[in-house]
Amino acid sequence: MHRMLEKEQTLDNTHEIIKIVNYPRWMDLRLIEQWADGIPTFSENDPLQPEWRETPTKPLDLGNEGYGLVYLKDESDPASNPTGTIKDRAAWELAVLYRNFARSLYLQIRTGLLAASELARMHVPRFTFLTSGNIGNAVEACFGKYHLPPPKIIIDSVKAEQIRPIIENWRADIYAIDLSRELTPEEMLTLTDNEKGIDITSFTPFNPHIVFYDWHVHEVFNKEPDYIFVPYGSGRLMENYLAWQYLSCRNAAAGSRDPRLRTDAGKVMRMNICGAEPANQNSIADKLTAAFKPFLLFRDEDVNGMRNLSFTGRETKRESIEENYIRAAFALMAKYGIQAEPSGTASLALYLKYFDEGRIRDDKKVVIVNTGKGAF
């Protein structure tokens, strides 16, 4: 069943249901077997059997442009990230939730705590979340691969019109909504007809600010940079870096370390994490300019606390970046043949600003994170 172009007024928001995908409403043993056995299991932190194939980190000499040597952590690599963005990592972590849910039900059935007949009264859990495109693209592709329930995706009505031919092909329930005001988790579930489901933007028990990009973070830490420049938006990337800096410190204090970390924890805590956010709300880096960012957990006060307690570098901060730098960075990526979108190049833009202002020395090692190309 497809309900195309259905419009209604809900919760004072213009609400367009672009697409609905048929999927069973109730649990059964077939679904449990499909999820429990069909989604592979990897060690969470064994570098010999990695959960994620490492994306390349390439030297990029910008000397001819008047800048220095940097190292580009390239998440656009399709050999690692199927849809060409860092959001493939987050999509995988969400798929793992279904595997673990199914195995939990198996355990309850095996121990007699749950009768198989009771499954027919259990709703199939569905995920609701907001996207400006990339996480929606990554999740629907990953969930399709493992035959998981189609996600319920909220996208801003203006953005939805721009990319309608693409999102109409997604295996997902898609809702175009006026996002000029912040929605509560309850409203998001109601708008997507998912009151018995889960709003991923407010679901924190599995620590999304830690697990979304844990492998990525350790890959970069092991390069031992002095500065790490990342785009700052709604994807929890900067939060992952800060969380793992703190965890590296805590592990070291306890006489242990994450086996993925191949450098000294003291070096990790001195790394400066620099988050780039467009100064212009109408920036071409439009995936970083959402009116509200429900995925964000860390506030500026949290970053200040991390810095004041010496869990991160003294220059760690979120900083606004002017549009001329974003355009220059995007042009440089294209010139050097790097697959990127403007939002993914905000990290390079902030580095260019630092260099122009004399805030970074030539002897410092810099890693620039390109979060990828995306589908549009």
Image (spheres, rainbow, N blue to C red):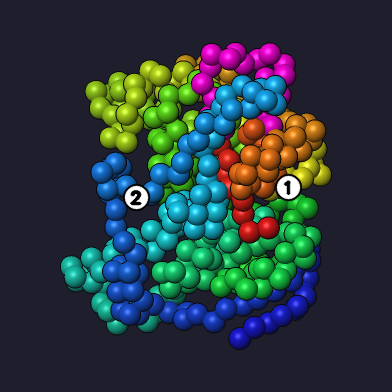
Q: Which residue is mark 1?
A: 286
Q: Quadrant of residue 355?
A: top right
Q: Which residue is mark 2?
A: 51
Q: Amino acid at mark 2?
A: Glu
Q: Position of residue 40 (x, y in %)?
A: 31, 61
Estimate the x, y position of residue 41 in percent, counting from the top left: 29, 57
Residue neighbourhood size for the residue with mark 2, other residues' Cα within 10 Å, grouped as few (<14), some (14–19), many (≥20): some
Q: Measured along the vertical axis of the image, is residue 78 above or below residue 227?
A: below
In this view of the protein, which residue sits in the foreground, 344 or 192?
344
The alpha-carbon separation of the residues under discs 2 and 1 comes to 30 Å
Which quadrant does the N terminus fall into? bottom right
Q: Is residue 39 above or below residue 21?
A: above
Name the residue located 30 percent from the left edge and 74 percent from the top edge.
Answer: 33
Q: What residue sits 45% from the left and 54% below the top?
A: 79
Q: Residue furthest left?
A: 111
Q: Earlier in the sequence, mark 2 or mark 1?
A: 2
Side of 250 relative to 4 (left or right): left
The residue nearer to you, when weighing 270 against 325, is 325
Q: Under tag 2, what secondary structure?
A: loop
Q: Local crowd at mark 1 within 10 Å, few (<14), some, or many (≥20)?
A: some
| Number of callouts | 2
Q: Is residue 123 left or right of residue 338?
A: left
* Residue farthest along the bottom direction in this orientation: 1
The C terminus appears in which quarter of the rendering?
bottom right
> What span is colored magenta in the figure?
349-368
What amino acid is found at the position of numbered circle 1 in the picture? Asp
Q: Estimate the x, y position of residue 9 in percent, counting from the top left.
A: 78, 70
Residue 134 in the image, given as x and y percentages of width and height:
60, 55
Looking at the picture, does residue 4 appear above or below residue 110?
below
Residue 257 seen: yes
